[in-house]
Amino acid sequence: MRLQLSPEMEAFRDEMRTFFTTQVPAEIRDTLAARRHLSREQYVQAQRILNAAGLAVPHWPVEWGGRDWTPLQRHIWREEMQLANVPEPLAFNTSMIGPVIAAFGNQEQKERFLARTANLDIWWCQGFSEPDAGSDLASLRTTAVRDGDDWVVNGQKTWTTLGQHADWIFCLVRTDPAAEKKQRGISMLVFPMDSPGVTLRPIQLLDGGHEVNEVFFEDVRVPAENLVGEENRGWDYAKFLLGNERVGIARVGATKKLISQAKQHAREITVDGTPLSQDPRLTARIAELENDLVALELTALRVVANSADGKPHPASSVLKLRGSELQQAATELIVDIAGPLSLASFADGGSEVPDWARVATPEYLNYRKVSIYGGSNEVQRTIIAGTILGL
Amino acid sequence: MDFQYDSEQNDLREAVRGLLQRAYGDPEVRRRTVATDPGFDEKTWARLAEMGVLGLPFAEEDGGMGAGPIEVGIVAEEMGRVIAPEPFVESVVLAGGLVAAVGTAAQRQAVLGPLSEGATVLAFAHAEPGTRWSTTARGVTATEDGGTWRLTGVKEPVLHGARADVLVVSAAVDGGTALFLVQGDAEGLSRTGYRTHDGTRAANVTLAGTPGELLGDGTADRSADVERAQALARIAYGNEAVGAMDTALTTTAEYLKTRKQFGVTLNRFQALTFRAADMYVSLELARSTALWASMVADSGGDVVAAADRARLQTSRAGRHIGKEAIQLHGGIGVTAEYSVGHYTSRLTAIDHVLGDGDWAAGRLAATVDSYPTVDPLGAPYTG
């Protein structure tokens, strides 16, 4: 057992820190630091800078741009990126469909998609959830019926994050309605969002933003070559993808950043002439949250160290569960520090409320999502109880 | 950065686990052992000594093994796994740790040699009625009279204070807190032992002009040494608590799989399995923090701050897991016949010996505004 990073890892961390804080435009990092939404162009610009330096898809196979890093290196890479307020490479591309195509796609698909996916030349969105298939994803009802050289897709997806920016969608569809188990009759198709018959409807969220969408399919014709992997094996690919999604979901660096901002804001608010940062109830709350975050970070390091075979460690469910809770606790802390200022959520010109206090509540409300997406925390508890405790 | 034990450490763990499994694998044996004084098994104590466990943290020239906090943590975790009642943390880590840190070469050899051999039991007499978790002594004072130090006052509760052959006693002197070695048969020393709720033994130790040997050279204030020794003991207790929590959770999960109600085993009820899952989350977070604190101690980092972090995390986890383990068992969890409640009792005791979660949170809170973020791999935790 050894606490310190090796000199090589120290150097690696410095290299990452230097790159992220000097090579990604301040305007993009400031937007993220102010917890404002990034534009499509900003996402694309940031990811292309990372990709040009080999930092967008380090976890992919080396042949397709991966770096053959250790789990610890990947952890450091991700944490430094979050601490520097650098937007992470688009998860739909780099953590989801990219690894699936690299692992299960045919050579033609790899050549057609992977480089453009890494560089965000194609913006992907995820067509998994449906109105009646949330945590019970395998009950999805969108169908694809073979007709000559095409699949014909009909149905509806929902919670399609940033679908309004997307060029392509990767979609779970039912291709064998008669399969004995509902998981067995599912396939994965990819197709352009501007295919005839695709309609996108924005869903407005509590924070006033437009982040997710409904997507409707009406007789959308998808060429047979756009089937990923084998027919009726889509559920296996989905599980592979969701396992990847959970790694790195602890978001320790991002929560650290929120807590340090909270401390700063607490110095700017005074209560009867005394800075709020000196309130013992507040400092105890911060100490407790910070300690929980230390425990989570150490657990993340312990888990990555034990998952060298590439498979997600079963305890990665702990990271998702606790990581989401701490992200939520940090956003809640900032709302509470803002106090009455947090009501000025949608103030524009003419308000003297600082920007951080304006975004505090919308972000707090928005962050309720993190314990729901990526396999809700109840799904994670089911995994822990079942696969770890054997219950 | 590496959380893996090396092969020697794995061997130590297996050896200690084997010894303690043979001794206390049957919870009934522990129950019988703690029912009679001294509250632990002298034979198991001797076997731990033969294995080198009782001299683990001490220098070889003092009769020890020259190992470090990682090895201490391994042993403590195994003690916790079967809630072995032998006073490893109390006698070796804390009382012995103080002698190792403060004592002269002659004192270290005279005290730590026999302790390592299992010939003696040490206790740290520091707590005083009406105070809590202090680094200083107030109620017991020491004065020098013709070259002899004499101590007067009351220490309580002193863990294993009645059984101890030698007491390390803190006392107020001019200029601060000094430490003294007091022999168990010293004049003016009266000790009244009793059983604590978790089966440990504690005592009221009353000193009335009792002679003591000043520990170390000179009467410089030793409260920083006390702080550091207590921090190392907190870390060891954190590891002990992790072992106890692990067994409490395993026992609970096993019970849920076998106990039937409404015609089905309890693991069919999601209301119960989700709570078990939350116990697992608490356990793993506490385990990471306890391991990390041992590594901080091993690498010469800020032991006191790391111990506070471990104390806070293991306190919260210990209460969560201890209480849920009983609740998920139902009534049987509150009985003395069944094992799981004893784990909760031990976790509750650990929580109050050297500072609880709120206490640790308060200490950490005092400095949160002085740094932007915590880096557990950076300063002040790396030495």
Image (spheres, grey):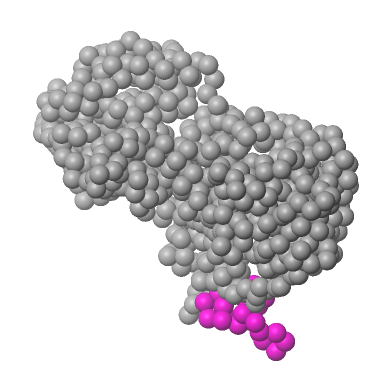
Q: Residue furthest bottom?
A: A350
Residue B310 highlighted magenta (yes or no): no
Taking the image as shown, residue A114 lies to the left or right of residue A59, namely right
**Can you see residue A252?**
no
Q: Residue at position x 87%, y 55% from top?
A: A121
Q: Residue at position x 52%, y 40% from top?
A: A315
Question: Residue A154 versus residue B188: which sits nearer the camera?
Answer: A154
The residue lying toward the viewer, choosing from A331 and B182, is A331
> Relative to residue B233, is residue A97 depicted above or below?
below
Q: Position of residue A99 (x, y in %)?
A: 74, 42
Q: Is residue A217 above or below residue A305?
A: below
* Residue B88 visible in this rendered orientation of the protein: yes
Q: Is residue B84 above or below residue A371?
A: above
Q: Residue at x 74, y 31 (%)?
A: A8
In the displayed orientation, state which residue is furthest to the top: B50
Quarter assignment of residue A24: bottom right
Q: Could you tell whether A113 is left or right of B165 in the image?
A: right
* Magenta-highlighted residues: A338-359
Residue at 84 percent of width and 55 percent of height:
A122
